[in-house]
Structure formats: C-alpha cells, structure tokens
Image (cartoon, coloured by chain):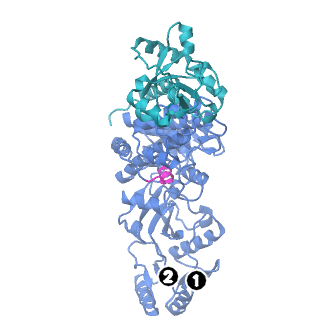
Chain colours: A blue, B cyan
Amino acid sequence: MVVFNGGKVFGEARTQKARGVLALCEASLHDPVIPDTFPWVVVVQGREEVGGAFALAKELSGGRGIFARPCPIRPRHGFVESRTISSLEEAQALWSELESADPEGELMLVPLLRAKYNAIFAPGLVVVGPGHDGATSGRNAISLPLPSSWVGESEMAGLIAPGEVPYIEAVLTEHGWVLTQYRSGPSPTAGDYIPERVRVEQVVHVDEGMDLLEWEGLVKSLGKGAVVYHPGGSAASHYGVHCIANGVPYITSREPRVGEVLQPSRSGWGRRENVVLANAIRESFAKEDTEDDLLPLSLALVHSIGAYVADSPSEEAIRLLGWAIAYLARACVGASLGELRYSPRRHRLPEDIPVDGDRDDIYAGALEFGIEDVIRYLAIAKEDFRAGGWPSGYGGKRWADASSVALNYVRGIVSFLNRPSRRALGRLMERANRLLHAAHNNGWYLNKWPDITDQGSSWVRDMAAQNPGRLAVSHPKFIEWMLRR
Amino acid sequence: MGRVDFDAIVRKAVEDYKEAITNAPLGTLLKEGLSDPDEIAKVAAKQEEHLLDAIREALQEDVPEGPEVIFQVIVGWNQRMHVQLGLPKAMNRTYGHAMDISYSDPRAVWLAIEWAHGERSHRSLNSQDTGVNTYVRLPAVATEDLKRVFVRMPFLSRALGREAVIAVEVS
C-alpha cells in the first residue's frame, strides 16, 4: 500500500497513473504556482490491502466520499471505469474487476471532488468540458490550441516517455482547479512552424535574454533559408510570434541541420481558416457584447494566435478567437473613452463621442461598438490626449501613445478583414502583443477593466503573455461562457 | 460589413475633432467648466477668428428688430461660467417674466457677452441698460426653448463701425 498524507509519500507505486498523481501531490506542496492536488491518496497494491486501505481512506475522507481509480500497469484506453465507492464490499468488488483486467494493476483511492468543469492540458492544447468527465469523454467539450504550463518538467522527471509530452487532467471545484492526473502522451500539436519547403542555410538559436524589439528586428532581417530553433518553445511565445508573422520557420522539436530540407508542417491553417476567422470577427462586431468581465479570456485567446496558426484548430475554436479579437478592440476603445471623460475639452468634443456617465457606463457602451466606431473614437481620443492642457495624472502623452498602439491593433484587424491571409494575421498578432506593453500614466493600458480573476491586472497581463491556456480557464465564468457559445 | 477604409475613418474623425474643438458654439465654451480665467481668456482669444467669421456671417442675415429692452449677460467667472441673464431695471420683471419673454419670441432676446471684452468682473456691460440685479441662469432653462439667440457685440460694433450681432447656438 502507498499513502500520501501530511505532505509525504509513504511507499512506492508501480503504475504510471498512480506515480503521476503522487508526483503531482508532492510537486504541488513545494511549488505555490502549481494548483492544488489531492490532500491524501491511498494506493492499493494487493487484494490483502483492500480492507485496510478502505478503512484508512474512509477516515481520511471525513465522510465526504471516496473516489476509486483503477490504474493499469501500462497506460491504456478503455480500462476498468473509475467510480465512487461507499462500502468495503464495493471496494472489494472493484478490486476483483481490476485484478482480472490487469493482475499487476493498482487501485487508487482519492477524495471525492465535486467538479463543475474538468479539463485536459497538454502543450498547445486545452480541452475543457462540463462535470467531472466532459473533457475526457469529449461530451459538450471545447478544444482550444492554447499553450499552458502547470507543472515544471523537472519536478516530474521520469514520468514522460521519450518523444511524448505530459498530459494533465484537472477538475474545477468551488475552491479552484485541482490537478487529478499527470500522464504521458503523443504531442497534440505540430509544434514546429514550417510554412513551406525550405533548405536550411542558417540556424538561428533563440536567445531568451535578448530584448524583444531586438529579436523582432533580427527576425525581419533573416533571409530565405534561415530557420529559428527554440528548444521547448511555443508558437505563441514572442519568439514564435515574430517568426510566424514574417514567414520564418520556427522549430521547437529538434535542432535542424544546415543543408537539410524541411517539409511544410502539418498546420491546417489556410484560406478556409482565414475566411472563417474574418467572418467571426465581422459577426462579433455586428453583435453587442453584454459581459464586461471577459477581458482576460479575450487576451488569452488573442495572444494565442501564433498557436492557432501553427495548428489545426476546430471551426468552433476559430470562431471563439474571432470574438476575442473584436472584444479586445472594444476593450481598448472603452479604456481610452473612460479617460477621455476628464478631457479639458470634454464639452467641445464631437457630439457623437460617448463620454457621458461613469466608467462602467462607458465600458458597457464600448462593448456595443462596431469596428468603424472603434476606429473613430480611438482616433479622436488619441488626438485629444495629444492636444495638451490635461491636468496632472490624467490623459496626456501616455494615453495618446497607448491609444495609438490600440489604433494600430485595430488597423491590423481591418487589414486582415479586407484581405484575410496568414501574413495579415501575423501582423495583427504582433500588434496585439504590443497592447500588453501599452501603459498610461500609472499602469497598464487596460488595467481599469473589471478583473473577475481577482489576481490583479499585472497577473492577467503576464499570464496572457506566458500562460494563456491557464488564463483562459482561470475563472468558471470564462469556461461557462465558452461552452455556452 | 463591407470593406472598411481605416485611413478614411481616421481622417474624418480627426477633421471632425478639430472642427468641434475650434468651432464650438459659444454656449458650449462657456459651459466648459474651466475655472482659470487666464485659461478661458486664452481659449477665447484662440476663437477670435471664428467669432469674427460667425459675425460676418450673421451680418449677412436679416436680424430681427429687437424690443426696446436689451438684456445683459453677465458671465460669473466664479460660478463655473454659468451665463446669467440680467433684466433691465425698467422692466422690473421677475425671473418668471423673463422666461415668458424668451418663450414668446426667442429671437428678440438680445444678449451681450462680457467675456468678449476680456473683462472678468461680475459687473454688467457698459450700456444704457445697466443697473440690473436680477439674474436668470441660462444653460439650465435655455436648452429647451432658447435654441438660438442673437448676441449683440458692442465692442465689435465699435470696431466695425456698425452694429455687430452674432447668432449663438445655446447648448
């Protein structure tokens, strides 16, 4: 029998599934960034242990229920089903079932969790669904090509088979995400971005210490035959984004050699995807948004455009991205108009500019704007911020600069809508990234929008850049909203 | 949604903005809420060219004959620029009576604007109808019934050698 309790593991599990869960439990205790796992785990390794293990689990559960998870010695699909057990007889019956399916298997007993949603996370993949098994069963679930990071690979060394990637399963309880499984599996994404057949003439290694603007300039200067190698990187990273925007191959899986010929990656992003996305953006601008607390979700999606382009996302996922692109533009104009209320020329602004009411009124109004309104109001706001006469701490040059970054982002949207192409999308992606660095007089440009995550706008901004998959599921409302669409 | 012309929208927005800022109606300017008299004088000076244009334009129109009574406008610098309408002593009218006149024939309301003289005191204009101590706040009551009034500009009248009248949209 193996027991995890009080922060320590006693014994050693033999199945990959049980070892993965126990490793998660230990890692979670040592790293505050990792979400919670189970407070206790009991692993039954033989028939003779069933009685004692069940009694121990019953005591540890405090009467709140026990969930039994059969573990095969080697990962396989369609194994004995997990279930709730409430008596010794049920535990013994389950053990018999397990034993006949796999004599070397183990039975893992964990606390019963009340899950509102569940999810699977892998590099470049987030699948989320309702209840405790919507994602794993694929029932009413949505699959998104979002990069996310939950557990450091070094903390889970030895659990992932060579050539495979980690898969994490989790459930969302009323207390937040609880990681429930860590397993090995094939990479769900292409990973590498190779837009067309190319003979490698130069391999450029990513220097993560390099200034991002410097990197952008470097990528733009690369000629045909240059290939960027970024071990462990992601197409949604700043390094990947600039490569995709400029059509430069971006390799994460292995180091390419000079002279070798690389074949185009199996990205499914093509003309059809561009058209679906353009239509989704148009439709989103034609419809009013009513929820003013979805900014983190929109940021997470927009900052994963690189991952979208490098992958083969579903139409559903692309449509969601279209919504996010429009929502973010509306959020920008809302932020600028919210500040424009303090203009020393407020009563002389063009009559149609909506600066009446408090900030919440302005935001609610902004979520109804069409793209032409967004452009017009951002242009006027930028002009007025530049006009001088602003009282200290309000408006002025910083707001003009931030509005200019937003206006450039919207210009990127318009260019893509007028001529949908992967290149135009790449440029839009670059401009969206700059929004994360736009600042007003005392903080990030969008930091006055409601923050339903309660983590603070800096956290939201950092997560959008580094961990968009995790940001997208950071609040039940985001998931509920995605599934409802 | 058809093809969006980003540059054309931005261009039009900037033009509209500049037009609105530089050619704001006088009533709007006065309501702007600036509390620093120097700042307001500066804004007024900037608008001088526009004022002159508007006056030239107004002079082309048929200005209705006004009543014998000339009202005064006194700009209260210390009262967030509420325009106040003074009644002539001879009329001996109350607030309500003043409004009756406005309702019956807004075109007949003649105003003179003190700020155009660059004066900042609370006293009335130098005209034959001074000595009035009854005031009516214009912005609050004017918006519904006084959409447009004619403003007599004595200082410009002197400068131009004829009566200068400006049409003011009251907002």
Instruction: Give the residue number, with chain letter if any, for mark 2.
Output: A106
Sort mark 1 into few (<14), some (14-19) or many (20+) by Cα contacts within 10 Å. many
Location of the N terminus of chain A (image quadrant): bottom right
Residues shaded magenta: A291-299
Asked whether, in this view, residue B150 is left or right of residue A444, the answer is left
Callout 2, which amino acid? Glu
Q: Secondary structure at mark 2?
A: strand
- Going from the N terminus, do you reach mark 1 or mark 2 first? 1
Rendered position, A340 above or below B91 = below
Identify the residue position indicated by label 1 in the image: A2
The residue drawn where x is 40% and y is 76% is A79
Label pair 1/2, CB-CB below 8 angstroms = yes
Label 1, label 2: how far apart the Cα atoms are: 10 Å
- Neighbours of disc 2 within 10 Å: few (<14), some (14-19), many (20+): many
Name the side, left or right, on which A250 lies relative to B40.
left
What amino acid does circle 1 point to? Val
Q: Is residue B136 magenta?
A: no
